[in-house]
Amino acid sequence: MSPLVSVTPTTRAGLATISAKLGLRDKMDLAPVIATVQTILDDIRAGGDTAVLEYTARFDKVTLTRENLKVTPAEIEQAVSSLDPALLSTLREAAANITRFHEAQLPQDIHLATANGGFTGLVHRPLDCVGVYVPGGSAPLPSSVLMNVLPAKAAGVPTIIMCTPPRPDGTVHPAILAAAAIAGVDEIYRVGGAQAIAALAYGTATIPAVDKICGPGNIYVNTAKRLVFGHCDIDMFAGPSEILILADKTAQPAYVAADMLSQAEHDPLASSMLLTTDPELASAVAAEIDRRVPLLPRRAILEKSLQHYGAILVVPDLGTAIDFANELAPEHLELCIQDSDIELTIQKIRHAGAIFIGHYSPEPLGDYFAGPNHVLPTSGTARFFSPLNTADFIKKTSLIRYTRQDLAAVWEKVAHFADSEELAAHADALRVRFDADLARQDKPTHSQPNHPAAPEVTGKETIL
């Protein structure tokens, strides 16, 4: 089934209506999911490995023991040796591209001298331990291993823990293990679902607690990540995948149709949209989609995605399409337009996770190989989130060092500032260094705000 097709030029108001329709994927009732996931998190936090094993048996139908939760080096070595050599070579080349791109993002420390020998600064330190979740689902995702692990490696994270659900026989797919070996994962555990997120967040006797969790997953995994956020960090709040293609008469219908289907096959909730200034292209792409869908193995998913969250729309001009792109803030934005319009269009795009430029930069190139990260903000969050990047695995720490001469030049100003906020002890922390703090004087001269008297401390209270 082809997506919604409108060959009548669509106005800005019409596009807003379509946007609201596509936004329905964010209006699911999550209350039952949250309740289920919270129970799992509580059970893992209380029961540790025992609860992890129980949930693995219940959800994955695999009976494991504490001793074989961790994937052994021999299993990893066997996976690498058994993988198709051509795929192994491609994984290594992709890893090199991803590493190069993310190492180029490493930030520089800041050191600013003060007037009298001191300095202020900013230093960058990698997180100590990062957890990566890799789905097992209907297909292995070695690309997710590379895209989530290699930025952390580029940042200098010393320990990376990976969780991925076991297959029915208790093993992990060789492609996932091979990608983990290439990327340099330190420990791998055969645990999936919300229970894996809980184990990474809280730690068990076997699985270490981490500082940050990243990686894709189903609605239960993503909900678990949201609920543990604050106990540890997470990469982002992920939703269904989406692509928006802006195309003109220079676009090839077969290319555009294939790119739309590459996103629609992810999930029934995935969104694929085409905005074009050419009515003939719109009709040709719709026909090409109808021809291709029955030939693809994930036909059922494609049909649901296209029926509910797909659209092919004609717009009066490229400016209208750009305005809609900025309103939608898509995860993936393809520009299949003539070369003369590309540079100005890129300048006008303010909100997009990743922009794929020209007729030979299809979205799957970014998924697997080019180097920029494929972990991107979805569901309009590209308005305020960025792609996963090296800085996501680095903390910043401020440095302040004033000499006595530096402080002597400004302490009265700072003390006055503190007085204006009625924080006398703050002000005295400046004055005491120059024998001027009022706590040393017999008659305090601080203006006293009209605060209620502090309660008498009896010794039984705990002062926080």
Image (spheres, rainbow, N blue to C red):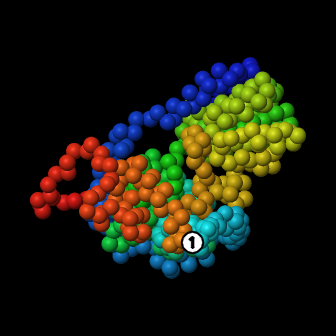
91 vs 386: above or below: below
Q: Residue at x 52, y 61 (%)?
A: 410
Q: Nearer the viewer, residue 11 or 120?
A: 120
Give the side of residue 155 with respect to residue 257, left or right: left
Place of residue 86 in the rendered image (x, y in percent of width and height, measured from the top left):
71, 68
Q: Residue at x 61, y 77 (%)?
A: 81
The quarter in which the C terminus is drawn is: bottom left
* Count of residue discs: 1
117 vs 429: above or below: below
- Classify mark 1: helix, strand or loop: loop
Q: Residue at x 72, y 40 (%)?
A: 349
424 vs 286: above or below: below
Place of residue 21 in the rendered image (x, y in percent of width and height, measured from the top left):
56, 27
Give the side of residue 248 with respect to residue 304, left or right: right
- Residue on which the image places disc 1: 118
Q: Residue at x 39, y 74 (%)?
A: 68
Give the side of residue 24 with respect to residue 60, left or right: right
The quarter in which the N terminus is drawn is: top right
Q: Is residue 354 visible?
A: yes
Amino acid residing under circle 1: Gly
Q: Nearer the viewer, residue 390 or 23?
A: 390
Q: Nearer the viewer, residue 434 or 84?
A: 434
Place of residue 442 in the rendered image (x, y in percent of width and height, measured from the top left):
26, 62
Residue 203 falls in image quadrant: bottom left
For label 1, the crowd category at 10 Å Cα-Cα, with few meaning under 14, some 14 to 19 and many 20 or more, is some
